[in-house]
Amino acid sequence: MTRSVVVTGVGVTAPNGLGTDAWWAATRQGVSGIRPVSRFDASGYPARLAGEVPGFSSREHLPSRLVPQTDHMTRLALVAADWALADADVKPGDLPDFEAGVITAASSGGFEFGQRELENLWSKGSKYVSAYQSYAWFYAVNTGQISIRNGMRGPSGVVVSDQAGGLDAIAQGRRQIRKGTTLIVSGGIDSSLCPWGWVAQMAAGRMSTRTDPGRAYLPFDRDADGFVAGEGGALVVLEDAEHARERGAHVYGEIAGYAATTDPRPGSDRPPALSRAIRLALAEAGAEARDIDVVFADAAGVPELDRQEAEALREVFGAFGVPVTAPKTMTGRLYSGAASLDVTAALLAVRDGLIPPTVNVTPDPAHELDLVTGAPRSAAVRTALVIARGYGGFNSAMVVRAAD
């Protein structure tokens, strides 16, 4: 279980850029993709802003035969997988059988598929599968479509842990490679911008109801009052480092450490377990707190959750002890797609020697965070920490670093 696992390809579909280059250019420049919802009429809902992937045409990016068989989230995922594999310059079908697989994360995307089924049910009767049944098997279909399209017959799976899912899926992919698989496509792409999904997300009481895109999602700010939902994310190609080296692949970096914890039940008077996840991830990577050059924060935008995360960072790194950033302020929170997009941002920060900014936020001094705001910060980034927290108490932390 000590095989080194590296990232050799990335594919991004994000609200502030379709494709890795477009998204990263926008992220470096602090360009936000948060705007009024256009996928459906949200005028009657308290929350009216979202991060929507711009300029995506299913018929432009996918064979016409696939369009009627899939929904928006699956199409985004298929395209991101195509781009990641092309970026890695690898064809899974050329590998021996069972040497390539797909492990992704999912959280809320089934709502959109279910919305379509509900509409069919209402209009055409009970011969259509119920939305609840479709929601249950939707996630496996999403991963299966990527596997079938690319001839990947190796390990396959789906991780469901809300915002933490992107990290958990990559960790599971790394685990499979350490067991002997050569290559895994992993990460998360999510989308639930439909009436049913919208109501379900608002039920948690964490979405911002502000209508100004520049003031709606403000993690670690005194004016924080919730988050903005978004769609998209990133898929990455994980590969055994030796195999990548033998074929001369470009390597973005190494998945060096990972850990996950679960918070105690509410009312137990026990503290959150985020700092423990961070320490365990550092330990697995063989790293100390002083080795981390930047933290990509979960950045909930909910005052109490922001306080907990800031407290965990102070506990591990000290007050103002490490640069912190939250580029998801430009995309909204992408559920299972968020953390894998942050991993991609961390790898590109290592490559380019800069930390992307957190936009629109004036950090609350009480948090004692060195939050990178306004503009990117030049820095010698070799090792980065990515944090993700999911609804229900999931905490995940992942260390990525430059590959030797």
Image (spheres, rainbow, N blue to C red):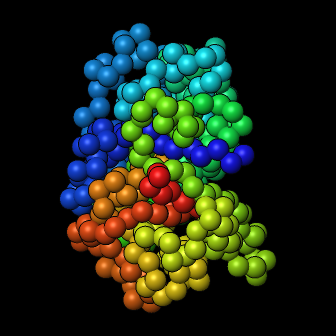
- The number of discs equals 0
Question: Is residue 341 in sight in this rendering?
Answer: no
Quadrant assignment, res 145? top right
Q: Position of residue 76 (x, y in %)?
A: 41, 32
Q: Residue 72 appears in which quarter of the rendering?
A: top left
Which residue is more in the foreground, 187 or 290?
290
The part of the image, by quadrant, that contains residue 75 is: top left
What percent of the width, then of the height, locates residue 246?
49, 31
Across and down, in percent, residue 9 comes to 42, 37
- Please give the name of the residue rendered at 62% of the width and 65% of the height, measured from the top-left corner: 286
Lateral position of residue 187 relative to residue 347, left or right: right
Above or below — where is 316 with respect to 43?
below
User: Where does the image place residue 14, in percent across and percent down from the top left?
Assistant: 35, 44
Q: Residue furthest top?
A: 65
Does residue 127 appear to the left or right of 89 in the view shown?
right
Left or right placement of residue 185 versus residue 347 in this view: right
- State whether residue 315 is above or below residue 162: below
- Residue sitting at 39 percent across and 27 percent down? 89
Q: Residue at x 24, y 71 (%)?
A: 374
| Residue 369 horizontal side relative to residue 130, left or right | left
Q: Nearer the viewer, residue 200 or 325?
A: 325
Residue situated furthest front in the rendering: 246
For the residue pair 194 and 250, the one nearer the viewer reads as 250
Residue 25 in view here: yes
Residue at 76%, 82% in the rendered image: 269
> 316 above or below 140?
below
